[in-house]
Image (cartoon, grey):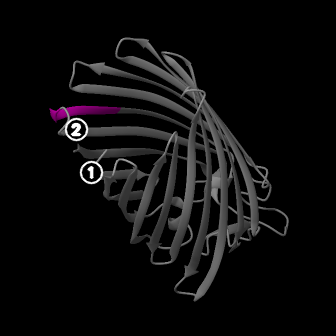
Amino acid sequence: EDRGDLLFHTYNGGGVDAYGPALLVRKKLLNKVSMSATYYADIVSNASIDVVTTASPYRETRNEFGVGLDYAVRDALITLGVSRSKEPDYIADAVNIDIAQEVFAGMTTVVLGYTRGSDEVGDIERGFFDSAKHWRYRVGLTQILTPRWLASANFEVVSDDGYLGNPYRSALIFGAAVPERMPRTRSSRAAMFRVIGEVAPGMSVRGSYRYFWDTWDIKAHTFDLGVSRRFGEKWLGDAYVRAYSQDGALFYSDNATTETLYLTRNRQLSDFRNAAVGAKATYTWMRVPGRYEVRLNGALEFIRTDYSDFTDVRTGSLYSYNATVGQLFVTVKF
């Protein structure tokens, strides 16, 4: 269907403020082809703990552009897309293809996908430049179990090669700051299982579990539970909770006591836990069946993150922070 979405997003937490607009426009052609274009911007003011303990706060803007093409062939949908994300010291390009095929009279949907990514990384002040390549392979299966319940299983393999670190980040050895040293290859796997069903007229519940593991010895678990309910003909509400836990990388150290080939103090590669609670609301403002529909949407999420092995060097205590994510957007279908 033809549609347009205009969104404004915000993030505040851990010393980082980010906000900006996003735009999606989709247009169908001959009922078999749909073309789309997207734009996304992040205006970031960064004074996170990584920055304030090793560098100076900064402000920058990241812009991302994308175009896509959907082509329906009998019971299959082929999706092609390209995107480019650019900021002062990082450029990321990606191209992807996905094929969704319905089988068994539409009771089962099989999805295959592939993404090829290429990044250019730099430190403008030092004149440092490097690159990284990424390959993503994915397969998924969605099965209608009953008229009210369906389940899905998805599996993804990711292979990374090249510069996978951050030229601005430092590690610690006996309290002395040294540049981090990261492996130039990484392979990861992720499997997710999801169930959703209607438990009462106009009300559904869902649950999912995701397991992640990689060659850096990181293992992570994600649990998600949610409920959606309609309130009359105009309102749709959604609430959810999410829990995440992760074991750190082999070469992560808060303050190393031995010299090793690889070493990082990237807190996102350490042991940590976070929990989130969120809510969404959709209001159908105007609707003329068969002609157009205008919806107003809002979402708010609160996140708490606690690190088990990352110290705030300013206080000597384990680091933790709260974050808030907000979205306001309007959707027009015509």
Q: Position of residue 195 (x, y in %)?
A: 56, 24
2 and 1 marks in contact (CB < 8 Å): no
Q: Name the residue under label 1.
A: 4
Q: Does the magenta stretch include residue 84?
A: no
- Which part of the image, by quadrant, shows the C terminus? top left
Q: Name the residue under label 2.
A: 295
Q: Report, in whole angstroms, how far the alpha carbon at label 2 lies from the one at label 1.
A: 11 Å
Q: What residue type is labelled 2?
A: Arg
Q: Is residue 238 in sight in this rendering?
A: yes
Horizontal relation, residue 145 to residue 279: left or right: right
Q: Residues within 10 Å of mark 1 (few under 14, many from 20)?
A: some
Instruction: Kindly identify the residue that appears in the image at 50 percent across and 42 percent down.
Output: 74
* Extreme-bottom residue of the structure: 127
- Mark 2 or 1, closer to the camera: 1
Residues rendered magenta in the picture: 280-288
Q: Where is residue 238 in the image (x, y as percent from the top left)?
A: 37, 27
Horizontal relation, residue 235 to residue 144: left or right: left
Residue placed most toward the observer, 5 or 162: 5
Vertical side of 187 occupied by 169: above or below: below
